[in-house]
Image (cartoon, rainbow, N blue to C red):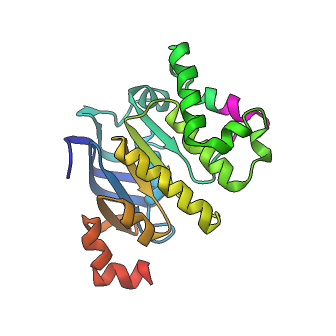
């Protein structure tokens, strides 16, 4: 475990109509960690990320970021505080170019010279995007769109990066590229909360993990222990 708590969820409840999507969950992400959320479809993993990025409201409980209660602030405010959300499905602005999508990722910033430097940094990190900088995002392959989604998230210079299913629908070779980037970001000190269908791959790249079942935290612990946990192996590792 490294650093101090950057994100804390305490007794977090989220409801869709009469359905409790999250049920009093407690979760902590320390600065510099990669923490992964595991669970079946509908377990509440994406809901947890959407709660943190303020895309959906909590019914009860606390969301604290860097020691500050952010449970009720607006989504644009959480971005300015240093949280970036890369959603499932990538959500490209398909009729804009790769470069324009990147610049939109920095909409909350006004340091134009540094924004341009960060664009160059993303092109160094993702050479395929540099080669397609003037291409419409909608014409990219699925892997390239995922790279663009991550690069766009990084353009806000986040302290906390929320990644929702980054490997979904991608070829194994591209998945390896995406997780190499996650390793690089981890080494650079970016704190990551990761939702990933490939539980084995997620745990290999995480410090700690939480297993959600029907909106509740069922199991939590160091990633290495979860990889060896008989219940986790039976349910998620095959």
Q: Residue at x 33, y 33 (%)?
A: 70
Residue 43: horizontal and vertical position, in percent?
44, 66
Displayed quadrant of residue 134? top right
Q: In screen coordinates, is 142 left or right of 220?
A: right
Residue bounds of the magenta highlight:
92-101
Q: Residue at x 48, y 44 (%)?
A: 56
Q: Residue at x 31, y 82 (%)?
A: 231
Q: In screen coordinates, is 104 left or right of 15?
A: right
Q: In screen coordinates, is 116 left or right of 205?
A: right
Image quadrant holding the C terminus, namely: bottom left
Magenta stretch holds residue 94: yes
Up the image or down, 151 lies above or below 114; here it is: below
Let me know if residue 57 appears in the view: yes
Q: Residue at x 58, y 28 (%)?
A: 119
Between 114 and 100, the one nearer to me in the picture? 114
Between 17 and 184, the one nearer to me in the picture? 184
């Amino acid at each position: 475990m490294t650093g101090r708590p950057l994100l804390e969820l305490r007794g977090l409840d989220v409801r869709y109509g009469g359905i409790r999507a999250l049920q009093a969950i407690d979760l902590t992400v320390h600065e510099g960690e990669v923490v992964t959320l595991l669970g079946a479809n509908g377990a509440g993993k994406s809901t947890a990320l959407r709660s943190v990025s303020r895309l959906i409201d909590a019914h009860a409980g606390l969301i604290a970021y860097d020691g500050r209660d952010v449970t009720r602030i607006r989504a644009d405010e959480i971005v300015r505080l240093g949280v970036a959300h890369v959603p499932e499905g990538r959500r490209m602005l398909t009729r804009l170019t790769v470069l324009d999508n990147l610049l939109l990722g920095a909409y909350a910033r006004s340091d134009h010279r540094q924004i341009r430097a960060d664009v160059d940094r993303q092109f160094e990190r993702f050479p395929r995007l540099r080669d397609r900088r003037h291409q419409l995002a909608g014409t990219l392959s699925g892997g390239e769109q995922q790279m663009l989604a991550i690069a766009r998230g990084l353009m806000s210079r986040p302290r906390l990066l929320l990644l929702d299913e980054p490997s979904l629908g991608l070829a194994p070779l591209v998945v390896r590229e995406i997780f190499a980037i996650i390793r690089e970001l981890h080494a650079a000190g970016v704190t990551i909360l990761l939702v990933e269908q490939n539980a084995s791959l997620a745990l290999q790249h995480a410090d700690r993990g939480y297993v959600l079942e029907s909106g509740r935290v069922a199991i939590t612990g160091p990633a290495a222990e979860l990889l060896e946990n008989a219940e986790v192996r039976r349910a998620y590792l095959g």
